[in-house]
Amino acid sequence: METAAPARVIGILDGMVIEERPVRPAARPGTGRKLAGGILIAAVVPFAVLTALRLVGYDGNTYTIAALALTPYAGIATLVLGLLALGLRRWWTAVVALALTCTIASMVLPRAFANEQKALDGKHVRVLASNMLGGGADPDRIVGYVKEHQVDVLSLTELTPEAITALDRAGLFQVLPYRVLHPAEWASGSGLVSKYPLTPLKLSGDSDHKQPSASVDLGDGVRVEVVAVHPSAPMWDRYEWVAEAKDLPYADAEHDIRILAGDFNASLDHALFRELLTRGYVDAADELGKALQGTWTNGIAPPVAIDHVLADKRTAIADFKVLETPGSDHDAVYAEIVLPGK
């Protein structure tokens, strides 16, 4: 098909007007589909890179660390791209996109299914971890959760001096009288508060966010060791993020039961976090099929699960909850942990 351009008069013969009409070539058939196919390929490539990083266990730089936290959503995105490619008959693009969907699903969907727990008859330890966003979290809500869930140990991160005063006014220290607190301005403070006596320990290395640890005396000769976890955010310093996470302790038979609770700034899709699990821990949310629940969002990114309670693998998990916390960009996480009997 040809498309006519405006005519140009070149002469008159016996009263007839003679015109010259230049002809423009028509657009080639299928040009729009080819453009759409190219856009689809360009959209699939970043997800292929992300999936490859996840498979090989490499967190990479600041940007890929952030992207890896969104891996569950990448599975949805690749499914949509695959269906669009099928609609446009871009068969190879569809195959690649849907293969990525299946690969991501194989890594992510197991988190929605509970694992069988050991039948243990020891004491129950109820742990709550809350990032207070520079002390801005609602103290009454935190104390309310402590009472409602009969919390034994509370891990607080981004704990400021002002937040301690507010928590005290809300009655926290009447319920949990023992404390190891290291408050600081904005995001650098942390602390442990307990129903039972605490003995300060040094279970992690030096940290900008003061990751305090303590032995908790549960009575009857039973003790557990707890760390309030908060490594540096990788968006600000990924080297500190790695160093401070790697300084967290191992759980093994040579020590009392250990529990790590707090804001890890990492999800199950980060190799750094999965390496922590190989040190003798289980993720409480993952054990009960609740590890797809997000705990943090900045209002732009979708919720991601970066707050955790890690329990010594010698224990069993009886309960896990994500609890909305007004005033903070993090939800609190609660776990009930069953210890082995004597």
Image (spheres, helix red, strand yellow):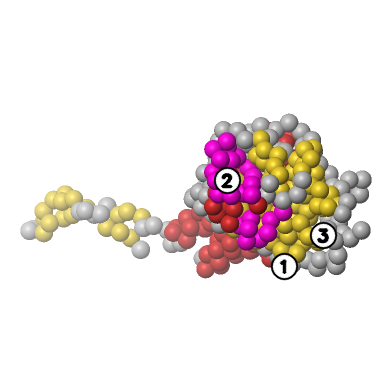
Question: Which residue sits furthest left?
Answer: 15
Residue placed most toward the observer, 170 or 110: 170
Indicate the position of residue 94 as horizontal and vertical percent values. 60, 63
Q: Residue at x 30, y 54 (%)?
A: 23
Mark 3 to mark 2: distance in Å?
A: 27 Å
Q: Which amino acid, by three-letter code, is at mark 2? A: Leu
Depth check: 326 or 168 in front? 168
Q: Is residue 93 above or below residue 251?
A: below
Q: Quadrant of the C terminus?
A: bottom right
Question: For the residues carrying marks 2 and 1, which lies nearer the camera in this image?
Answer: 2
**Gap between marks 1 and 3 measured at Cα:** 25 Å
Label 2 SS = helix
Residue under pointer 2: 167
- Which residue matches tag 1? 113
Residue 26 falls inside the magenta stretch: no
Q: Does the CB distance between marks 3 and 2 fall below 8 Å?
A: no
How crowded pointer 2 is (Cα within 10 Å; few <14, some 14-19, many 20+) is rated as some
Residue 46 is left or right of residue 21, and the answer is: right
Q: Residues within 10 Å of mark 3 (few under 14, many from 20)?
A: some
**Residue 187 image offset from top left, x and y in percent:** 58, 37
Residues in magenta, as a range: 145-174
For marks 3 and 2, the one nearer the N-term is 3
Residue 111 appears anywhere in the view = no
Residue 146 forms part of the magenta stretch: yes
Q: Nearer the viewer, residue 64 or 330?
A: 330
